[in-house]
Amino acid sequence: MNRLSDRRRAFTLIELLVVIAIIAILIALLVPAVQKVREAAARTQCINNLKNIGLALHGFHDVSKRLPPGCSTDQKPWGTGGGHGSSWKVFILPYIEQGSLYSKWQFTGGSGWENVNNTNLVDQYTIPVYRCPSTTLPEFYQNNVAQNGTSRQMFSCYTGIAGSFNLGFNDPTIAGTTCCDANSGSVSASGVLFPNSSVKLVEISDGTSNTIMVGEQSAHLKDALGQNIPGPNGAITSQGPHGWIMGTSNGDSPPNGQNRAMNTTTVRYSINQIGLSLNSGGTTGNAGSNVPLSSNHTGGANMLFADGTVRYWPNSTLALTLAYACTRNDNQTFTDP
């Protein structure tokens, strides 16, 4: 009797297969939902990163009565002695809970590249607020690229907006000199963070709510086959081959200066227009001034406006709308896409 009861309680092979099939279907339904939740969380964290960067830029402005330079040379008021200075990402370190790092910084001797003290400080050093959780960029450079041959710097995921490439009729400040190669692109001073900039918020005549200050740049450029372009160090971004700390070596702002404006971009392409061959206009790895704004978020990228707000703009944003938003004083109006 007991043996018969045991047999009746056991699963048949068909019943077992049905249960397995049901579980498989449930998993198939749940995985996309889980992925969406994770992406939503990552996008929210990216937004929070940019909000913190916005607060830091405003904090710097409150103290210095101007925004930091997009990229600087070591000359007054940003340093002494000349050479490649520091980027805006260095100047706001005290305002993103990196005061200890900033206190050790030397704004002399080529602070953004040649200075061994500084490059050693950031060797394999990660600042979470500068990294989007959804990025596919490597965490660190694959090669030793600093002047002293030892510093492997973090890939940051955000870039300052120097201005717009596409408003030539409204923007006489397009750098005409070249450096390193003919594909370095053009640098504008029509934005908020350009080489040796010193912009005050009151000088943003289009309004801080209408002007993008920092954009997301956290996806790889792609080749014709859709494969990542690693460049010389693992990825191509506007920080170039020398890291997130590097500024520029020329003391002028556009239209003078050089066609390399590390850690800033003069917007030339649409959002996530990343299907560009290496050395397309302004996308050279050393260092292109027109590397596109990009992200791995679905369908768009996050933008930090000068009023401190963060907005998600889709890939379908018109290039002209993006150009207007990247220019601080063109007197052009636009509607959020």
Image (cartoon, rainbow, N blue to C red):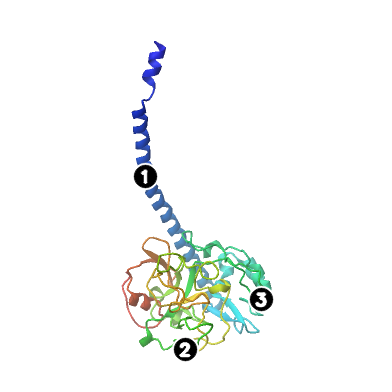
Q: Position of residue 273 (x, y in %)?
A: 38, 70
Q: Is residue 91 visible?
A: no
- Specify few, some or many for label 2: CA neighbours under 10 Å numbering under 14, 14-19, or 20 or more: some
Compared with 89, 12 (above or below) is above
- Specify few, some or many for label 1: CA neighbours under 10 Å numbering under 14, 14-19, or 20 or more: few
Numbered disc in front, either 3 or 1: 1
| Mark toward the start of the polypeptide (3 vs 1) | 1
Q: Position of residue 161 (x, y in %)?
A: 45, 76
Q: Amino acid at mark 2?
A: Gly
Residue underneath mark 1: 28
- Specify few, some or many for label 3: CA neighbours under 10 Å numbering under 14, 14-19, or 20 or more: many
Residue underneath mark 3: 115
The structure residue drawn at horizontal position 43% and vertical position 70%, both measured from the top left corner, is: 293
Q: Tell whether 92 sits left or right of 2.
A: right
Q: Amino acid at mark 3?
A: Asn
**What is the distance, in whole Å, between disc 3 and disc 1 at their CAs?**
53 Å
Residue underneath mark 2: 176
Residue closer to the observer: 202 or 274: 274
